[in-house]
Amino acid sequence: MALLLMFVTLLHVITLAMLFIATMEKTWWVWDDSKLSDLWYNCRLDNSTETWLCTSTKESEWLHAVQVLMVLSVIFSAVSFLVFLGQLVTMSKGGLFYVTGLCQVFAGLNAFSAALIYTLHNKEILQDSKKLFSGYFGYCFILAWVCVPLLLCSGIIYIHLRKKE
């Protein structure tokens, strides 16, 4: 049981870190090594100074939806972890981690919705950028998709997990 508890805790911390990176990093869409786009900025590499020059992304309802859902996913996962730690201390023997599991499932559903919206509406989100056919999805977008099954699985594990002394 202790091994399962350590596994779930480690999985939770890893998915929380992956969610945070997917939300904050600069590579949701990549045109080439010198032009990137994320949920917050469009960036290009200035070759003369070797620095990234970033401007805010163009306002879009779809982009706002993706931003909000990814931030909510991070918040739900963080709250879930704090509730889990609190339940470890306060819950009686035999209790189930329902609240922790539900928060984790909500985090997974938010990440799923955000990644799906970005997949289906990237033309509207990146409307004034370079031609889309010359670019591809970046690693942060892929991280968001990888987080979805991890969050849902850990949520289900939490729901079935019982506290033993």
Image: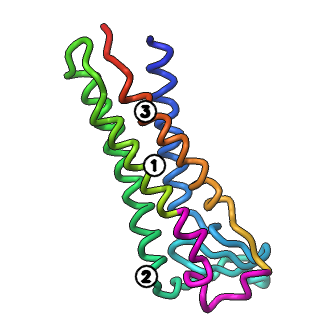
The image's mark for residue 156 is 3
Q: Nearer the viewer, mark 2 or mark 3?
A: 3
Give the farthest residue toward the front: 120
Q: Kindly check if marks 2 and 3 are in contact, taking CB atoms under 8 A apart as contact.
A: no
The three-letter amino acid code for the residue at tag 1 is: Gly
Circles 2 and 1: CB atoms closer than 8 Å: no
Please tell me which residue is depicted at 52% across the width and 72% down the height of the picture.
39
Q: Secondary structure at mark 1?
A: helix
Q: In x, y percent, where is residue 53? A: 63, 82
The amino acid sitting under disc 2 is Glu
Q: Residue at x 68, y 59 (%)?
A: 139
Residue 125 lies within the magenta run: yes
Residue 24, which numbered label? none
Residue 61 placed where, x, y %? 43, 82
Q: CA distance from mark 2 to mark 3?
A: 32 Å
Q: What residue do we see at 39% from left, 67% from top? A: 68
Q: Which residues are magenta?
A: 115-133
Q: Earlier in the sequence, mark 2 or mark 3?
A: 2
Task: Identify the residue under disc 2.
Answer: 61
Horizontal and vertical percent for residue 129?
65, 88
Q: Quadrant of the C terminus?
A: top left
Answer whether labels 1 and 3 touch (C-beta < 8 Å): no
Counting residues from the N terminus, which is met first, the one under dot 1 or under dot 3? 1
Q: Specify the farthest residue to the bottom.
A: 128
The residue tagged 1 is 108
Name the quadrant of the N terminus. top left
Up-down relation of residue 74 to residue 150 (above or below): below
Q: Is residue 27 above or below residue 7?
A: below
Considering only order in the chain, which callout, 1 or 2, is on the residue closer to the N terminus? 2
